[in-house]
Image (cartoon, rainbow, N blue to C red):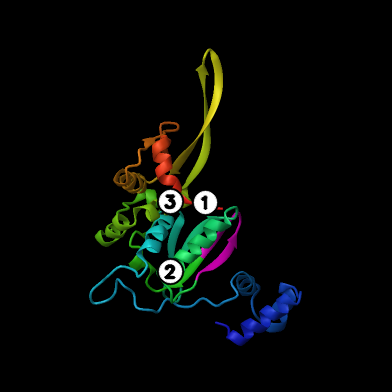
Amino acid sequence: MYALAARAHALALLDSGRSLNSVSKQTGISRAALRTWQTCPEPLRRMDGPCPRCRPLPGPPDDIAAYAYLLGLHLGDGCISDHPRGGHYLRIACADAWPGLIEACRSAVLAVQSTGSACVLQKQGCVMVTSYGRHWKCLFPQHGPGKKHERVIALEPWQQSIVDAHPWEFVRGLVHSDGCRIINWATRVVNGERKRYEYPRYFFTNVSDDIRRLYTDTLDGLGVEWTHCSRGGRPYNVSVARRASVALMDPHEGSKR
């Protein structure tokens, strides 16, 4: 660990135009650490506040609406990994093309755990919204070894209660991670003339049968009609195309951008 003063001094040198190599040689700080600090100037704070799941009487996070959204993001594009010195990293992958999604994800992380922090770490083609803490596994018990579609994904009763209270936020998180809203088109014959018409449509794609079922069960509860849209015999795509159902979803989903 580097002292805060050393961190501030190194960042000041970088801001002045110095290269990573020269600053590393002068300060003795590794280039990997310098690169991370450039992306995340503020040091990661440990999530040491009281965990709502570890209290004598376990309860939900304070902001359950933000949690429902973050749960959807986590099931779609999130993971939890161990830190070598204890604690865990929550990471949510967000595409570079959608800065609105990146900020919404970061805001949800901070709302769920206000004593922590959320850094944006650049990767190839995406960023990882990353937060360190000791209780992320308590808040997201769906973590586990291996790929999500190769193991059972089920909500705990307390999580299901949150989804029942804020179903649109949960659906929004799933759509923002593994879904999209597109303009589809088709043709039909009108008065003997073939005409093209366009209509909006939502797609959600996930290899996990369990995660797709969580999505469709929530849509059922909201009165949204959906169908499976198989490709190559694989039922990985869930489509919402009926005009009334798209109209139900539009006010709640928002734009990733």
Which residue is at a point 32% across and 46% down the rendered structure image?
222
Spatial separation of the CA atoms under disc 3 and disc 1: 10 Å
For mark 3, what is the residue?
252
Hey, which residue is sitting farthest left in the picture? 57
Q: Amino acid at mark 1?
A: Ser
Mark 2 vs 1, N-terminal side: 2
Q: Position of residue 9 (x, y in %)?
A: 67, 84
Determine whether, in the image, residue 78 is placed left or right of residue 25.
left
Which residues make up the magenta segment? 118-129
User: In the rendering, at what x and y percent does residue 165 appear?
Assistant: 30, 58
Residue 12 lies, with reference to residue 126, above or below; the image says: below
Where is residue 88, by image quadrant? bottom left
Q: Is residue 84 above or below residue 143?
A: below
Residue linked to disc 2: 111
Residue in the image at 35% along x and 70% along y: 62
Compared to residue 66, the image places residue 201 above or below, namely above
The majority secondary structure of the magenta stretch comes to strand
Q: For marks 2 and 1, give the CA distance.
A: 20 Å
Residue 132 appears anywhere in the view: yes
Q: Secondary structure at mark 2?
A: helix
**Mark 3 or 2, which is nearer the eye?**
3
Q: How many C-alpha atoms fall within 10 Å of the one at disc 3: few (<14), some, or many (≥20)?
A: few
Q: Which residue is mark 1?
A: 255
Q: Earlier in the sequence, mark 3 or mark 2?
A: 2
Residue that lies at the very extreme toward the right in this rendered image: 17
In the image, what residue occupies the spot 41% across and 31% down? Answer: 233
Q: Identify the amino acid type marked 2.
A: Ala
